[in-house]
Amino acid sequence: MSTADAPIETSSIVALNFTMPPLRVFIDTEFTSFENMQLISIALVSENGEETYFEVDFDDWRCSDFVRSNVIPLLGAYNNALINDAYLPAKILEWLQIVRKNEQYILICHDDVVDWRILERVLSGVPDWVKGENIYYSLSPLLLESFYEKHGLARHHALHDARANAYAYREQTNGTNASPC
């Protein structure tokens, strides 16, 4: 029997479940600056409420004045968040595998393409069952403000911002931002 006639091994083929709606996972990152970009922290919050958050070591000299004033003071608030960046890709992929059900695909919802690009870079590319979606125009500004006020949280912390985006997200309906009001 030639290799062309041999049966195809299918045990390693992953079939995406498109019959289930995708799982939305909201991402936010904090980084040193646009000019000398290096990841500082990353948060992922699923629409079901599961979340993960990591901080990594970074070079202080890369930080903009804005980051020094608004991001760095918020770091260290969550125990066990600091991780060696060598382990970060495996931890993120492990978490994504845990939260997805029945081989459903995941939509990484970002309000800025920089967050998606950072995730792609951290993972050295994303699995085929992970897609990105820009949700900037699907975020209710009123709900964003309400979230930060209600919870007394500061902006520019990756976990706070990812939670806020999950809270304020509203699917687009007929080209308009649907609001609960």
Image: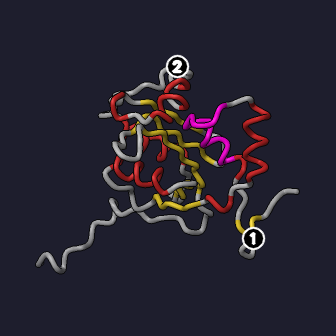
Above or below residue 137? Residue 70 is above
Identify residue type, mark 2.
Asn
Residue 72: percent from the left, percent from the top? 49, 27
User: Neighbour class for label 2 at 10 Å: few (<14), some, many (≥20)?
Assistant: few
- Please report the bounds of the magenta region as a residue range: 154-166
The residue lying toward the viewer, choosing from 52 and 70, is 70
Residue 147: quarter of image: top right
Identify residue type, mark 1.
Thr
Report helix, strand or loop for mark 2: loop
Residue 181: percent from the left, percent from the top? 88, 57
Q: Residue furthest left?
A: 2
The residue lying toward the viewer, choosing from 87 and 66, is 66
The residue pinned by badge 1 equals: 176
User: Neighbour class for label 1 at 10 Å: few (<14), some, many (≥20)?
Assistant: few
Circle on res. 133: none
Q: Residue furthest front?
A: 65
The residue lying toward the viewer, choosing from 11 and 124, is 124
Q: Are marks 1 and 2 in contact (CB under 8 Å)?
A: no
- Give the alpha-carbon distance from disc 1 to disc 2, as whole Å: 40 Å
**Prevailing SS of the magenta stretch:** helix
The residue pinned by badge 2 equals: 79
Tell me if 3 is positioned left or right of 7 in this view. Answer: left
Residue at 26 percent across and 71 percent down: it is: 8
Q: Quadrant of the N terminus?
A: bottom left
The colour mode here is: secondary structure
Residue at 45 percent across and 53 percent down: it is: 114
Q: Earlier in the sequence, mark 1 or mark 2?
A: 2
Q: Is residue 10 highlighted in magenta?
A: no
Above or below residue 169? Residue 158 is above
Report helix, strand or loop for mark 1: strand
